[in-house]
């Protein structure tokens, strides 16, 4: 059995930028404190500037019906194991090399989210608040992020040895780039209301599936996919990387698979491009806030699988 280097990995941060994301560059202490993060990723208002959101989640079938035949080959489901401070998510039976941990992030203002993960399920609940004064930077919502690869930080100093003894344990884990394997095309997952009192966000624009490329600044760069129909999420939703696009609320923006990725290198810089590293740091699920009403949610994500070409 493959095991991660530590259990329960979370962080604390803060952000006020409209496209701020959860945990870029954060180190994971071994057996960390498990504080709830206050950073996340809004990108832009749901259905906001830029036109109709990009279509995605092409593999979802109708609510309650059988899913359509897939165009992809699914690997084994990732093994989800709750810990005292989060959850470990590992490809124990497949070949993707995913071995990471889950963290919770939420906006600094008026978003309330908690996790209650189970064996095989990432479960969370809460409510986003109505965005005031178009301030998406502080009202963006909540995000559950899966760091795909966690390993010992190569830049961390070696632990000091006690007198008369070898150096002990300790140290930190750091998120490392997960190189996209040959033939890998995306992810699938199932999301369903958590029990009798569970609820999925009501609107298709309330849920985003996201991915963060190596080298992207999540405070400035957002690559996402608007999930088409939350009522159909109990069927496996397949999201190929080709349908995860730069600022997915805009029309015609390039996908995360493009040879050159869109990027904004600094807060005051204009949009430019850089070479695609073909490596990811994380994937995540975001419940987006909006200017119309609060968004309650209480659902679980399970059956997370890597997808490969047939």
Image (cartoon, rainbow, N blue to C red):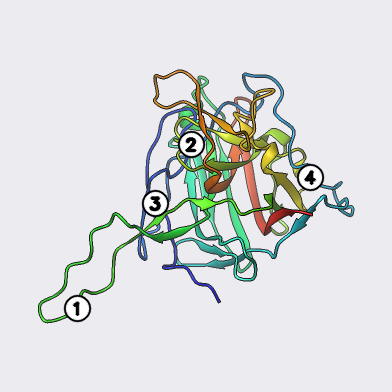
Total numbered labels: 4
- Residue depth check, mark 1 versus mark 2: number of the one nearer the observer: 1
> Which residue, given by chain and number where applicable, does mark 4 sit on?
231
> Which residue, given by chain and number where applicable, does mark 3 sit on?
11
Which mark is drawn over residue 110? Answer: 2
Q: Write the residue at 77% across / 57% down.
A: 73
Q: Quick one: label 1 or label 2, which is nearer the N terminus?
A: 2
Q: CA distance from mark 4 to mark 2?
A: 26 Å
> Which residue, given by chain and number where applicable, does mark 1 sit on?
166
Q: CA distance from mark 1 to mark 2?
A: 48 Å
Label 3: how many residues lie within 10 Å, few (<14), some (14-19) or many (20+)?
Answer: many
Q: Quick one: label 1 or label 4, which is nearer the N terminus?
A: 1
- Is residue 195 placed above or below 5 in the rendered structure? above
Q: Write the residue at 71% across / 62% down.
A: 75
- Residue depth check, mark 2 versus mark 3: number of the one nearer the observer: 3
- Residue depth check, mark 4 versus mark 3: number of the one nearer the observer: 3
Q: Is 185 or 249 nearer to us in this picture?
A: 185
């Amino acid at each position: 059995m493959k095991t991660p280097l530590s259990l329960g990995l979370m962080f604390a941060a803060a952000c006020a930028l409209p496209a701020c994301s959860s945990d870029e560059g954060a180190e994971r202490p071994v057996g960390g404190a498990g504080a709830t993060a206050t950073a996340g990723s809004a990108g832009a208002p749901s259905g906001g500037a830029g036109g109709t959101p990009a279509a995605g989640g092409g593999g979802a079938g109708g609510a309650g019906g059988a899913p359509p035949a897939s165009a992809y080959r699914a690997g084994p489901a990732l093994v989800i194991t709750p810990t005292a401070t989060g959850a470990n998510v590992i490809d124990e039976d497949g070949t993707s090399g995913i071995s990471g941990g889950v963290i919770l992030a939420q906006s600094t203002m008026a978003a309330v989210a908690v996790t209650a993960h189970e064996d095989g399920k990432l479960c969370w609940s809460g409510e986003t608040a109505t965005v005031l004064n178009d301030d998406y930077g502080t009202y963006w919502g909540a995000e559950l992020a899966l760091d795909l690869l966690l390993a010992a930080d190569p830049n961390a100093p070696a632990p000091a040895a006690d007198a008369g003894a070898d150096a002990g344990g300790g140290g930190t884990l750091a998120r490392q780039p997960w190189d996209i394997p040959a033939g890998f095309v995306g992810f699938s997952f199932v999301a369903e209301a958590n029990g009798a009192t569970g609820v999925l966000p009501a609107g298709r624009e309330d849920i985003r599936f996201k991915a963060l490329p190596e080298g992207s600044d999540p405070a400035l760069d957002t690559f996402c996919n608007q999930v088409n129909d939350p009522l159909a999420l109990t069927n496996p939703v397949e999201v190929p990387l080709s349908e995860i696009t730069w600022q997915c609320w805009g029309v015609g923006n390039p996908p995360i698979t493009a040879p050159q990725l869109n990027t904004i290198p600094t807060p005051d810089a204009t949009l430019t491009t850089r070479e695609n590293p073909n490596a990811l740091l994380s994937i995540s699920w975001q419940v987006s806030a909006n200017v119309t009403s609060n968004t309650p949610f209480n659902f679980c994500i399970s059956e997370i699988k890597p997808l490969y070409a047939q």
